[in-house]
Image (cartoon, helix red, strand yellow):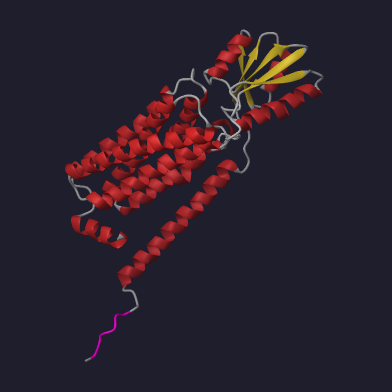
């Protein structure tokens, strides 16, 4: 009895699909490298808002804003400058103090900008013969000296959103139909609550946040929903290609545009311009405010996240209603392939 051997040579369709997969993954990987390196390889300050109180010599204020690195914000006095720092309207302040000037910095807003202000800026003033002392408000804890815990928490939330959306598509299917989309949204919302709560608990434990626990949970939920709903919509319209586009938006561009240890004002070009409008960028700034600046508003960041969620929900529902999505056989085949 002869046994028919299975051919190890792929057919033409399989070969084309494998080639497309290799090209797609290679392209995303190279774009990932280029985006991270482009955004973070040479941080330089661009229009960093700094409060300058009355009593600081006018020529000093003029020299601060001369090269475009600093945007001088004139304030009435020291109290006004500190209030602007508390509300995150400025990163630092230069005020009259003691026998000269005092540089007030807030490392929790950006450790890198604080280093720039106390190093390069204060050093340049001292070279002009001006005595400058340094004062610190809103410090970072010893367990998170660069303020990275919050950023990595946001990265985890963003990953949960698009990865969860993809897996829920395999579980519930992405074939046309409002019901399937609603089930994916329900599962995504459950995931958002769990990951938001877990991320807030872990980061608070590691970094020792004193404020904003419930705000962190809300931010986690909205970040997961923002990246997840957009991913669902893209998959409804474009199938597996939509997953790649979601990774391109939220990982390749969004994560470096969030700034990491840096602030938006230290990033170049398009990352600086669009970073605050991405889910990761908005969430990273809101986490810093919630954890370290109880007087600061996170309203604008919440609006950004809600806008992403709203667009994703609406687009996915429109796609489902118009019969867009992967057919049932394709969905089952995808699930079998993962299994």
Relative placement, left or right, of 229 versus 111 is left
Q: Nearer the viewer, residue 52 or 2?
A: 2
At 36% from the left and 34% from the top, the residue drawn is: 221
Q: Quadrant of residue 143?
A: top right
Q: Residue furthest bottom?
A: 1
At 75% from the left and 19% from the top, the residue drawn is: 132
- Numbered label tally: 0
| Residue 258 visible in image | no
Question: Which residues make up the magenta segment?
Answer: 2-7
At 44% from the left and 42% from the top, the residue drawn is: 156
Q: Nearer the viewer, residue 7 or 205?
A: 205
Q: Quadrant of residue 315?
A: top left
Residue 213 horizontal/vertical position (percent): 43, 27
Does the segment drawn in magenta span residue 3? yes
In the image, is residue 197 above or below residue 129? below
Residue 45 horizontal/vertical position (percent): 62, 31
Residue 142 horizontal/vertical position (percent): 61, 33
In the image, is residue 204 above or below residue 8? above
| Residue 289 visible in image | yes
Does the segment drawn in magenta span residue 149? no
Quadrant of image for the N terminus:
bottom left
Q: Nearer the viewer, residue 157 or 44?
A: 157
Quadrant of image for the C terminus:
bottom left
Residue 314 horizontal/vertical position (percent): 26, 35
At 60% from the left and 35% from the top, the residue drawn is: 146
* Secondary structure mostly taken by the magenta-highlighted segment of the chain: loop
């Amino acid at each position: 009895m002869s046994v028919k051997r299975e051919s190890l040579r792929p057919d033409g369709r399989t070969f084309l699909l494998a080639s497309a997969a290799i090209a797609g993954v290679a392209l995303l990987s190279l774009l990932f490298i280029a985006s991270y390196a482009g955004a973070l390889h040479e941080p330089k300050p661009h229009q960093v808002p700094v409060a300058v109180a009355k009593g600081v010599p006018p020529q000093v204020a003029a020299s601060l804003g001369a090269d475009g690195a600093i945007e001088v914000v004139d304030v009435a006095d020291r109290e006004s400058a500190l209030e602007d720092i508390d509300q995150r309207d400025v990163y630092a302040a230069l005020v009259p103090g003691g026998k000269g000037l005092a540089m007030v910095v807030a490392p929790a807003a950006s450790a890198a900008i604080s280093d720039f202000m106390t190093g390069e800026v204060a050093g340049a003033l001292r070279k002009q013969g001006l005595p400058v002392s340094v004062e610190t408000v809103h410090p970072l804890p010893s367990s998170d000296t660069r303020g990275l815990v919050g950023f990595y928490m946001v990265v985890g939330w963003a990953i949960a959103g698009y990865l969860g959306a993809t897996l829920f598509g395999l579980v519930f299917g992405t074939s046309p139909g409002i019901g399937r989309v609603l089930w994916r949204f329900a599962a995504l919302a459950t995931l958002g609550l769990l990951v938001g709560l877990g991320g807030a608990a872990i980061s608070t434990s590691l970094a020792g946040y004193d404020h904003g626990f419930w705000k962190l949970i809300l931010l986690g939920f909205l970040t997961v929903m923002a990246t997840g709903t957009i991913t669902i919509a893209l998959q409804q319209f474009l199938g597996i290609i939509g997953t790649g586009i979601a990774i391109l938006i939220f990982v390749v561009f969004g994560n470096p545009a969030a700034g990491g240890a840096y602030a938006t004002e230290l990033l170049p070009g398009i990352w600086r311009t669009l970073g605050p409008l991405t889910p990761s960028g908005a969430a990273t700034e809101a986490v810093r405010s919630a954890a370290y600046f109880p007087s600061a508003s996170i309203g604008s960041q919440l609006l950004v996240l809600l806008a992403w969620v709203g667009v994703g929900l609406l687009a996915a529902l429109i796609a489902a209603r118009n019969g867009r999505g992967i057919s049932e056989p394709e969905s089952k085949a995808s699930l079998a392939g993962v299994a």
